Amino acid sequence: MNESIREQLSAMADGEIQSESTRFLLKRLDRDPEFRGLWERYHLIRDCLRRQDHVLAP
């Protein structure tokens, strides 16, 4: 998996990607277990960071 695809997946997780790229990535998520695992890790990291923000907020 190349760095460009990883960046696109990260951008999709952050809601920062165009719809045509989203369609391509969703198809890849459907057929590529390694890609799906990366997607799950990105979401886990995001969720942990969001929880940390709540803990650190005054």
Image (tube, rainbow, N blue to C red):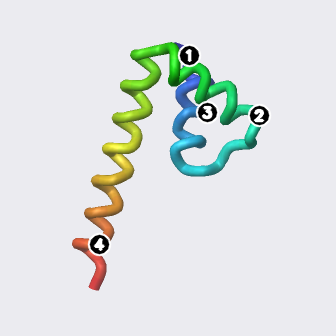
Marks 1/4: CA–CA distance: 33 Å
Q: Is residue 27 above or below residue 51?
A: above
The quarter holding residue 19 reads top right
Disc 2 residue type (three-letter): Glu
- Residue lying at the far bottom of the rendered structure: 58
In the image, is residue 29 above or below residue 55? above
- Residue 45 picture quarter: top left
Q: Position of residue 30 (x, y in %)?
A: 52, 21
Q: Dot 1 lies on which element?
A: loop
Q: Is residue 44 above or below residue 39?
A: below
Q: Please tell me whether mark 2 sits on a helix, a strand or a loop.
A: helix
| Label 2 sits on residue | 20
Residue beneath disc 1: 2
Do labels 3 and 2 touch, CB within 8 Å? no
Q: Which sits earlier in the primary sequence, circle 1 or circle 4?
A: 1
Task: Indicate which disc, 3 or 2, sits on the residue closer to the N terminus.
Answer: 3
**Which three-letter amino acid code belongs to the residue tagged 1?**
Asn
**Real-space CA distance between mark 3 and mark 2, rounded to the nearest whole angstrom:** 12 Å
Q: Nearer the viewer, residue 5 or 37?
A: 37
Label 3 – label 1 distance at C-alpha: 10 Å
Residue where numbered disc 4 is placed = 54
Other-residue count near label 3 (Cα within 10 Å), few / some / many at <14 / 14–19 / ≥20: some
Answer whether labels 3 and 1 touch (C-beta < 8 Å). Answer: no
| Residue bearing mark 3 | 8
